[in-house]
Structure formats: C-alpha cells, structure tokens
Amino acid sequence: MTSTAIRPAATASPVDTPILEAHNLTVAYREKPVLWHVDFAIRGPSLVGIIGPNGAGKSTLLKAVLGLLPVGSGHAEFFGQPLRKVRNRIGYVPQRESVDWDFPIQVLDVVLMGTYGRLGWIRRPGSAERELARNCLAKMGLEGLEHRQIGQLSGGQQQRVFLARALAQRADLYFMDEPMAGVDAATEQAIFRILAELRDQGKTVVVVHHDLRSVPERFDQLLLINQRLVAHGPTNKVFTAEILRKTYGGRLAILDELAVAVKTGQPST
Amino acid sequence: MWHEMWSTSPAGSAAAIAFWTIVVGCLCAVPASLLGTFLVLRRMSLLGDAISHAVLPGLAIAFLLSGRVSGWPIFLGAVITALLTAFLTRLLSSTGMVNEQAGLGVVFTSLFAIGVILIGRAAENVDLDPGCVLYGAIEFVPLESVRVGPFEWPRTVPSLALTAAITVAFVVLAFKELKISSFDPGLADSMGLSSRRIDFVLLFLTSIVTVLSFEAVGSILVIVLLVAPGCTALLLTDRLAWALFLAVACGCATSATGYSAALATNTSVAGMMAVSGGVLFVIAWAFSPLHGRIAQVLRKLQVDLRIATDDLLAYLFRKEELRGQPDGVEKHDFVRHPILERLALRRAVRKGWIEPGSRNLQGPGRLTPAGREVARSLVRSHRLWESFLHRDFDLPEDHLHEPAELAEHFLGPDLQKELVRELNAPKIDPHGQTIPGTASEK
C-alpha cells in the first residue's frame, strides 16, 4: 500500500495542527461526572479506536466532542478551529439503536441525509446528491436495496447503510459509535476495509469499539477510557496487558484476558 | 349554487352551511394532520392533548385582562400558555428527575387545574359550557361572519386558512430538516441543522393549530385530527412524503364523512368527525395492503401453502426413493391440516408437479418430471442442511431432521452452492442417505 507516500501530501493543514484536540473535557450527567479531565490531541490521518468497559463514557466522549451533550468544562477543537466553523468536515455515525428503523423512509433517502449538512437549511438534494448517494451505497455493496424500507434490512445491512451515509458526508474526520455492533464477521471486515481506505485517503476515523480481540490489527492508535483517559498512543505502545487491566479495572473477561495474552505474546498474570 | 354560496351571507342556506362546515373541518384537518404525522413519528402525539388542556389558564387570564371571550387577547393567552407548557416540560425533564412524558403529564394537568380554579373564582358569570369545550361548536361556525375583501366569511375561516397555509409552507420548505431531525436528531445536530429549532417551530405551529381548532371544533376533535390521520397514513405507506399526502387526504375525509354522518344521524358534528377518524384508522389497520392485518394473514397463508406443497413433493420423492419406483398420493399421507393439504395438492397439480389423477385422492397421482426436479432440490437442501448442522453445530443425529425441515423451504440455489463448497461436496448425509445432485449432474 502506498499510504505512507500519500499521507503527508493529503494533510492540507500544517503537520503540527492536531486534527482533533480535547482540552480538559469534563462531562457530567445530573451533577455526577462521567468523564473527567479528558485531554488529548490526534495528529495525522489515523484510524483511532476508543476502547473501555461499559459505562466508561466512550459514547459520551463522542457526543460531548460533537456538541450533542452539554460539556461541564473544557472544549474540543477540530483542525485548530471550533466545531461550528468546520461542521461540514465532520461526519458522524450514531449507534444503530439510536434511531427508529420502522421510520417511513427508504435506504436511498437515509444515505442522502449524508449530504444535508453541506446543503444547509432549506436547499434540497438534487441529482448530483442522488448520484453520490448511489455510489456510496454501491461502495458498501448495497446495490439494489435503494428503495427498501430500512426496517426490512438485516442488522449488518443497516449498519452498512449508516456507513454509506457517512461516506456521503465526504468528511475529513469521522466519529463512529460502535459501527461493528451486531454485524457479522464478513460485514465487519468490509467495514474495516472501507475505514482503512478512508485513512489512506488522508482522513481520520475515530471509532468506539467493543471487541478487544480485533483491536491490534485494526487501529493505528488507541484512546483507552474509563471515566478518564487511561492511555493514548500508538496501538503497539498502549495495547498492553497492564494498561488494559488498568482500563478495565480487573474486570477483563477470561476470554479477553487470554486473547490479550495471545496478542501481546506475554502470558497472563 | 356556487354563486349563491359566495355572494350571500355564509349562513344563507343549508347548502352554504354544509359547505362551510366541511371547509372549516378541512382547514383544521390539513395543518393538524401534517403536524400530527410528525408528532406521531417523534412519539410526541400526547402533545396536542396536553396543549388543549393546558391553555385553559391562558384563556382565563386573557379574559380577566381583556374582559372579552373571543378575539386576539384570548388567542394570544392560549398560545403563550401552550408554549409555556412545552417550555416547562423541557425544563422539568432537563433536571433529569422525570422523563419527558411524565413531565408533560405533570405540567398540563397542573396548568389545567389552575385554569379551572381561575375560571371558577374570578369568572363565575361567564358562560363556559363544558360541552362546548369538548366538542366545540362547528355547526355554528358558519353563523358568525366577518368581511374580508369583497366576501363575507365565517369568522374563523381567514385565520384557519392562514394557519393552514403557513403550516403547508413550513412542511414543504423544511421537509428535509423535518425528516432528518425526526429520524436521527443526533446526526441533524452534528450537522448544525439544529433539531431543537425544528422542534420549536413544530411546537409553535401545533399550539396555534390546537388553539384555533379548539375554538372551531373543540378539544376532542382536535386531538383526533392530530393523531388519527397520521397513524392511518403510516399504516398505508413506507414513504414520508406519501404519508403526509395521505394524512391530509385522510384528515379531510374525516371531516367530510363525519359531517355527512352527523347529518344522517342528527348527532354532534364534531363527535361524528372523531368517530369517522377512528373508523378510517380501523379500516386502514385491517385492509392496508402494506401493514394491514388481512394482508399479513394472507401473506402468512401463502407461505404456509408453499411449505405444504413443498412437503408434499418431498414426501413423494422420498417414497419413490424408498420403493425404487414412482408412487402416488394416498389418503393416509396427509398428516397436517387437511384443508391446507388439499389446497397444496391442488396447487401442485395446477403447477404441473403432480399428475392430475391425484386431485380427488383417487388413483395414483405421481410426481411429474418437473415436480420431481422441484422435490429433488428440496430434499437436496434438506440433506445438505443436516450435513451442515451435523458438522458445524455438532448436533446428535436425532436433532437434525426438524431444523432441516424448516430450512429446506428457504435454501435457494445460491445457498445450496455455498453449502456444497463449505462441506466439500458431500455425497451422503449424516443419516447415510444419498444427497441428490442438481438437475444437471444427476
């Protein structure tokens, strides 16, 4: 892959401007903080995994950064600018369960929503947007399903519709909330292939991920979170048994323990 | 007649009264069904109900301040309390102590109670007929007229028409925004298409429509117009734009049929309109080709019939296999529902899969060559699936038949091929029986 040759050229902004920077971010639900002083900067086109136990605040971090949740203190910057100036360069894939799949809407219409941000208020998608949406559907292998009502699709297909919609956003920075939840192995591979392709085109993809076993070969860097930032760095540096145990607070399941031991090459303690 | 309707006072003739009553009904129905469809989709359909109750203190205070029972002050008071309802509900649910539905319940009942007390204490001499509040007085709407331009209109028509026009314009212009913020508010917000702003407009228009229609058609009917047409339309289509068209059509039909039914039975017009809204919903629930109950039952019967036919063919195929020669259908072959089996037999004969002799279960009805191919494929699917279960699920032999009996009806040629590849082209199933080849390789 020629990715190393492409990457520096594709970053238009100066190399030292982080693509995403969180400054001392604290988020509270009903007075109770769920994220404490999260502080990090992501540079360079990268595939970033956010991992941590249930209730660690992974989704909360995404939503807070995107301004979908009130932030107690701190702030986030994108390409060195505040969110409102760069919204059109940011794509978002919410959790699949967050929408009503019985909604009267067809597959192509959902993908078209990816173009709404660039269109802005009132302006409608035209033939150019339709063409783009069709291409994105084809890219996710969903040709022929354009006019299906979305509830008729399988879980994996629904997730791919969301991915196609994200592609239609043509963003430079993507946030995806558990895009691999409830998908089969083949779909997961297909999705990761697309994400790697986006990275190779100079984009950055931040993914909330659950399956520890597939972490090392998938992500370039990791944010390990448990109500605070436990570690951030290149996967080969931070995906260690020690840091994982710190993140999961000894709650690592036996299978995960073993998987980590196999991946890191060290026997479990 | 048209000339007469437009030139004389609206109360001029029975035909004019009928015309204007239906027009007023439709003018309420159009905006209410459009907004209501979105409220139903956003699971906010209780809002209309809440608003129509919560406006009472607004009406009372406006009356106390202005001393009149109608006109702009009353309207303003009602709209302000309606918005206050929504605002207080938000405030309450944002504390995180109660959810939005419960918050709404608390707010609107409290406001309604305050309204009742205010009216009871300070406006004892006002004629507030509970009947009027519940059912409105749509029959009398044409009797009061105002002059706008060259024509005389029933008093409520101009303001209702204006509201309807504004609502239609809003839905048409902001269709894209309404769609995304109803379906995926998180994405809408992340794009800067604030779903809260859309929420606010939706709420504002719902308040105005509720208050205006409340005066014209009463609080029960306005809830029917907000909820029923949207629910009915959503049973009929899977496309949002169509759902909106159908909701409007359904709302107008509610108004027209309700009026006719009321005339025929000499009962309350608003009450009859509400009944007809319910009747239309029940009709759609039963007969909708898409989500209707009858269509669902028919679709299930169709599948059952196909499965019964499949079973019949596969049975005959196995019998041939066992005896080494073609054999016909016998009466004791029928083990399942007799009517379904008979229908299946008839279907198999019609399709040319079984020789016609078997139609009345007299004489041997054997598999035709075409029928044998269908049966071969079914048995092939069945035994391939058993092999797959045996290998990949490690099930004992006596657990294989039942799941395969279900799966065989849904395994097409492509999945057969995949199974063959996965299992390295097996020749014999776990029970030691030959897996029949495809038509080309037999």
Image (cartoon, coloured by chain):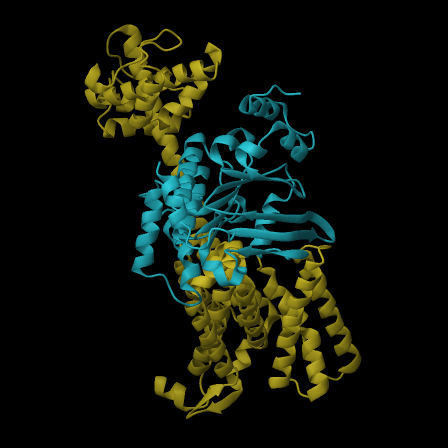
Chain colours: A cyan, B yellow
Q: Quadrant of residue A225?
A: top right
Is the C terminus of chain A in the top left, top right, bottom left or bottom right quadrant? Answer: top right
Q: In this view, does B287 lie to the left or right of A127?
A: right
Can residue B279 be seen in the rendering of this structure? no
- Image coordinates of residue B354 in percent, x first then y, are 24, 22
Q: Write the residue at 44% across / 60% down.
A: A117
Badge count: 0
Quadrant of the drawing holding the N terminus of chain A: top left
Toward the viewer: A29 or A21? A21
Horizontal side, residue B328 vs residue A7: left or right: left
Q: Does residue B369 lie above or below A210 as drawn?
A: above
Asked if one can make out residue A84 in the rendered structure from this viewpoint, the answer is yes
Residue found 42% across the figure and 81% down from its top: B15
Up-down relation of residue B343 to residue A179 (above or below): above
Percent position of residue A11, x then y = 42, 51
Residue B358 higher or lower than A160, as above or below: above
Q: Nearer the viewer, residue B100 or A225?
A: A225
Percent from the top left, x then y, of residue B33?
A: 48, 65
The residue depicted at 64 percent of the width and 73 percent of the height is B133
- Foreground of the two, B64 or A9: A9
Measured from the top left, where is residue B419 in percent x and y? 35, 21
